Amino acid sequence: MAKQTIKDLDFKGKKALVRVDFNVPQTKDGEVSDDRRIRSALPTLTHILDQGGSLILVSHLGRPKGDPEADAAFRMDKVAARLQELIGRPVQKADDTVGPDAQAKCAALKPGEIVVLENVRFNKGEKKGDPEFAKQLAGLADCYVNDAFGTCHRDEASMLAVPEQFPSDQRAIGLLVEKELQILDQLLGQPKPPMIAVMGGAKVSDKIGVIESLLKKVDKLLIGGAMTYTFLKAQGHSIGMSRCEEDRLDVAQHLLKLGGDKIVLPQDHLVTTSLDPNEAKTTVIEGSDLPEGQIGIDIGPKTAEAYAEIIRNAGTVVWNGPMGKFEDEPFRKGTIAVAEAMAASPAVTAVGGGETAEAVEQFGLADKVSHVSTGGGAFLEALEGKSFNSLRVIPDRD
């Protein structure tokens, strides 16, 4: 059932509390290094402003520990400044979330104006789902919009207890969350065949549930990244000094048995003796056994071409997790090959959040795939078929 969206609400003269996901990557000095999540929220924010509403934006940033000095890098000032550049309107920044400054700025808010509240995780009540904190936060606005897909799998106050403070007809999802749910409906409903999943990253343990779920739907599951070597060791192969989850070999064996010939492992590997890109001397090893002292760092060229061919001929492709240590130039060819194949494929192509989204953005291919999810953990949990309480409290559309 489709959820009530911002198209169903009248924002004229109303203050909209919009839960956004502005948890953006930062440089060491706190500057925004990747503004994709801010840009992704702009259609929702612009719609509300164009309808005569005003915006009270709430987000978390980083993982503050409660130490004001150490947490200074997680203040929302530079995020608010970047939003102002992107949206082309003045953006005020409150120095607290529900305190005197936030209350004063929100009370004075006029149609067309924007306030960004301080990092919501600076308040202990956020993680605890505290009802009193939620009541204070909700009291700043007239209606609530959830446009933070990346946090939809969490029952924090701003995601669950806050919307519950508003009448049901004053709760909605934003355009970004709507798009995420539409893509997931395609992936989980009746995807166009053949359906291919590409899974990379470091750990099998992070993706057990989603791999089990996908194996019921996909025609092929292509494996890359460091998790490759847990699977290979589970098959009895030598993996040199490659990363391996020794305590998950039984899980890997279970998944291999469950998947049968659906699971495709690399047929060649880029290996190195050092993870330092400046010192790395790379070679390509064919087959499934790696020599002693070598570290598998990326899929090899034959695997990259084989995976690309499968992707180009797919009807639906979902990808989560890089094929290698893509952040370093010598180790990114496999990830680039998959990204380019996704961009060139006529299939419905969905890229899971986190590192994979960063990779396609970095390679300039984000606009050439069907969808790049803003959620990492939320995207994976949704693919498992899990439902989210944060969406349960948003009414279904009539």
Image (spheres, rainbow, N blue to C red):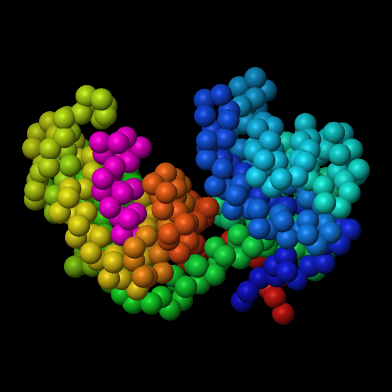
Question: Is residue 300 or residue 366 the one in the foreground?
Answer: 366
Placement of the C terminus among the 4 image quadrants: bottom right
Q: How many marks?
A: 0
Q: Please give left or right for residue 30 compared with residue 331 in the image.
A: right
Magenta-drawn stretch contains 333: yes
Give the extent of the magenta segment.
Answer: 322-342
Residue 72 appears at what percent x and percent y? 65, 25
The residue positioned 56% from the left and 43% from the top of the image is: 35
Residue 337 appears at what percent x and percent y? 28, 52
Residue 187 appears at what percent x and percent y? 44, 70
Q: Is residue 329 above or below residue 159?
A: above
Question: Is residue 162 or residue 144 the one in the foreground?
Answer: 144
Res 254 → quadrant: bottom left
Res 64 → quadrant: top right
Question: Is residue 396 or residue 198 the one in the foreground?
Answer: 198
The residue positioned 58% from the left and 30% from the top of the image is: 31
Q: Please give left or right for residue 149 compared with residue 166 in the image.
A: left
Q: Please give left or right for residue 203 compared with residue 84 in the image.
A: left
Residue 244 appears at what percent x and percent y? 24, 41
Placement of the N terminus among the 4 image quadrants: bottom right
Q: Main secondary structure of the magenta part?
A: helix
Residue 119 visible here: no
The residue furthest front is: 88
Residue 302 visible here: yes
Res 10 → quadrant: bottom right
The residue positioned 25% from the left and 60% from the top of the image is: 308
The residue positioned 37% from the left and 70% from the top of the image is: 347
Magenta-drawn stretch contains 264: no
